[in-house]
Image (cartoon, rainbow, N blue to C red):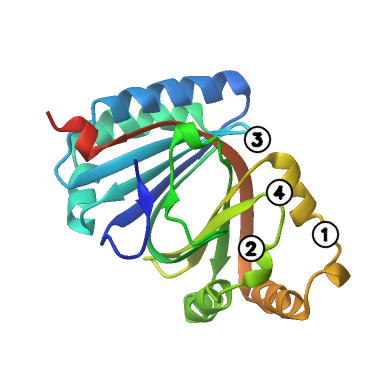
Amino acid sequence: MPLITPDNGSLTVFNLFNTTDLQKQATLLEAMRGIISNANYDGWRSSTLHGGIAKPCAANYIQWRSLADLRERYEGENFKHNTVPYFTDLTTSVHLLKTEVVTVQSSADAPVLIDPDRDDFTVIVLMGCDGADQAELVDLMTKPDEWMRTQPGYRSHSILRGLDGDIVVNYAQWDSQADYERFHDQPEQQRPRHDRDMRARARSLLTSYESNTYEVVFSRSLEEATP
């Protein structure tokens, strides 16, 4: 199963697809599951498919050996002339984000895994920023936070830096939707001072903010694909 860590040298790609209704989401997920089930691209390491909860959408968390391997996939004729047009017809917006894992934190310092059998309630947050501010935003988001470990239902969060320089991604795992919403909806005055200061400074750096919630529905890795 895929492991989120800054130590495995993987290029992490988020393919995020927004659509209009649950029927199109189901079609997206079925098509993506088929692609993942047959993945055998040079340099591909794993793909983990997520279905949207709050809004109709799909997300694919993909690990690659290198940027060169990803470019070879994207420049292939089948991808350009078949895969891209098909998904364009089903979606209202598409993000293809190249990132690297900067840091991870979990409730009990356990490895951060992605697997359908874990039953995580997953939150993916995209934070857009100017290139000159990305390093500061990453620094704010990656400071160790013991208070987070005390929050009921918190499992982990992982911060990833966009390689194009204008985005930071927070990939978070919770026990349940209720636990996440309880944390998310806490009044500012009930949060510790360091958290309030961090949030205020981070908000001042953002040029965009997009969040959605997901369940992991399918995963496959190179080890499973190799006889």
Amino acid type indicated by mark 4: Tyr
Secondary structure of the residue carrying numbered label 2: helix
* Residue 180 disc label: 4
Query: Could you tell me residue 182's position as x and y percent?
Result: 79, 50
Instruction: Say whether disc 2 or disc 3 marks the residue closer to the N-terminus.
Output: 3
Q: Nearer the viewer, residue 225 or 91?
A: 225
Between marks 4 and 1, how big is the CA–CA gap?
Answer: 10 Å
Q: Earlier in the sequence, mark 3 or mark 1?
A: 3
Of labels 3 and 4, earlier in sequence is: 3
Considering the image in quadrants, where does the N terminus appear?
top left
Q: Is residue 79 visible?
A: yes
Residue 129, x across and y down, in percent: 55, 70
What's the residue type where badge 3 is placed? Lys
Res. 151 mark? none
Q: Callout 3: helix, strand or loop? A: loop
Of the numbered discs in the image, which one, if any, rests on residue 55?
3
Frontmost residue, 1 versus 213? 1
Q: Amino acid at mark 1?
A: Gln
Counting residues from the start of the chain, the first of labels 1 and 2 encountered is 2
The secondary element bearing badge 1 is classed as loop
Checking the image for residue 149, the label placed there is 2
